[in-house]
Amino acid sequence: METDDFARARASFLDGVAHFEVQQFDAAERCFVAALQHLPGRASTRINLAATRLALRRPAEALAELEAVLADEPQHLDAWCHRAAALAELGRDADALACADHVLAHDAQQPQAWYRRGLALERLRRFDEAGAAFERLLALQPQHVEAWFRLGQMLQRQGRLEAALACQDKVVALAPAHAAAWSQRGSLLEALGRRDDAVAAYEQAMALGADAELHRFHIASLRGGSGAGSPPAPPRAYVQGLFDDYADGFDQHLVGVLGYRGHRQLVAPLPALQPGGFAAALDLGCGTGLCGPLLRPMVRRLDGVDLSPAMLERAAALGVYDQLHCAELAEHLAHSGARYDLVLAADVFIYVGELQAVFAGVMRVLQPGGLLCFTVEQADDARQVVLSAQRRYAHSLPYLRTLAQRHGLQLLQALQQPIRQQQQQAVGALYVVLRRP
């Protein structure tokens, strides 16, 4: 016969499970805590409490519960799986992977451990291994929606676009309201040249609650964005995510594969324009620091600013910048206390769009006699700022002349030269130098 404490604990536990299943996590937590007050130390209750605290975004508290369970039952595999989830939330991806591998060493058929292994490997950027983990999971659970979604992402990274699209098709068949899968389908259909289908997928993603600003930006680029309907700037999250993801192979791909030369051609005329060098320079959108080593010999202080933390980490490793700032360009220029006699932006404004705010900020930090040097991809003179299907903005020379005049800047140079290759075609660019009188 059940004791009163056991009966109360069981009732509170079942109430907690019911609340958890309908995502009433605060109520679930109260029920699991109550259950433990009646029956302290019960492993199943502590694990469910940990899962609830994970759902409440309190991974440190979840981890404490799981450590307590494992102190009493070191081989409790369910606790090890949840421990992997808690460690991942705390950014300890290698430890999360070790937890998943511990479970799989004891039970290679444990689906949740394969899922946690895949996620940890993905976060560690071991993408091929992550894909293999999701494939193992799908062999065990063919209807696992998130495994299909993640596998599609891994296949897309490998350039296996048709296979990746088949995965996302599987996701939306199993879970039609999966907004992220519709978004991923859009990017795949776009890469496969199916623009109308891509637009329809992005629209469906928005209808299901995906980031409207981001998806409108994608759609505008596919429709040849310019004029009143074109977004004046890319979403901040898009730019940061793009370059965080691109940081590891950025220099090799841009310079080695695309034949990028803008940084060298932009810096080359500076010694002749300012034979005595510069007191202080600001590298706008410095990225991994391609311009840094070229600028360092001619400047006494060199600062950089970029939106991507991963890019800035690579730039800092060069040891040529005095200060690096993680910020959006116009915001940084509007609030910086520093002043410069050189502001340089190599291959940056293509990810900015409208340049009014940037020019206003440059005028705020640029000393009299100072130079603003930058590149832009060149737009037709009749179309001031144009968003391309490659998600990059091009700017026309008349637009730049107007901005310069508006802000009292003297045009010293506007050279037309290629800046990179795209699909084996040279991309035309303007190399512009302006002086503040």
Image (tube, grey):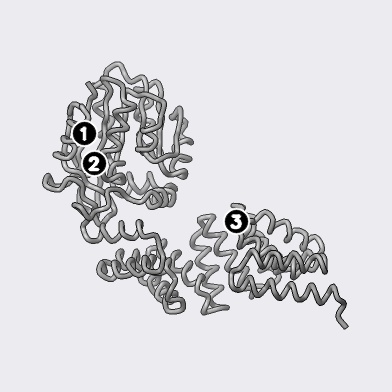
**Label 1, label 2: how many angstroms apart (C-alpha)?**
8 Å
Kindly give the residue lying farthest to the bottom in the view shown: 1
Viewer-proximal residue, 192 or 402? Answer: 402
Mark 2–mark 3 contact, CB under 8 Å? no
Q: What amino acid is found at the position of numbered circle 2 in the picture?
A: Val
**Label 2, label 3: how many angstroms apart (C-alpha)?**
40 Å
Identify the residue at horizontal 77%, vertical 62% (top origin): 70
Left/right of residue 271 with respect to residue 428 in the rendered view: right
The numbered dot on residue 130 is none
Identify the residue at horizontal 32%, vertical 50% (top origin): 234
Q: Quadrant of the C terminus?
A: top left
Left/right of residue 122 with respect to residue 95 in the rendered view: left
Label 3: how many Cα within 10 Å (few below 14, some 14–19, many 20+): some
Identify the residue at horizontal 26%, vertical 58% (top origin): 220
Q: Pinpoint residue 114: horizontal percent, then vertical percent.
A: 59, 69
Do we see residue 164 in this rendering?
yes
Identify the residue at horizontal 20%, vertical 44% (top origin): 395
Viewer-proximal residue, 220 or 119? Answer: 220
Q: What amino acid is found at the position of numbered circle 3 in the picture?
A: Glu
Residue behind mark 3: 89
The numbered dot on residue 432 is 1
User: Of callouts 1 and 3, which one flags the residue occurring earlier in the amino acid sequence?
Assistant: 3
Viewer-proximal residue, 318 or 211? Answer: 211
**Label 1, label 3: how many angstroms apart (C-alpha)?**
46 Å
Q: What amino acid is found at the position of numbered circle 1 in the picture?
A: Val
Badge 1 marks a residue whose secondary structure is: strand
Is 327 located above or below residue 207 in the figure? Answer: above
User: Of callouts 1 and 2, which one flags the residue occurring earlier in the amino acid sequence?
Assistant: 2
Residue behind mark 2: 376
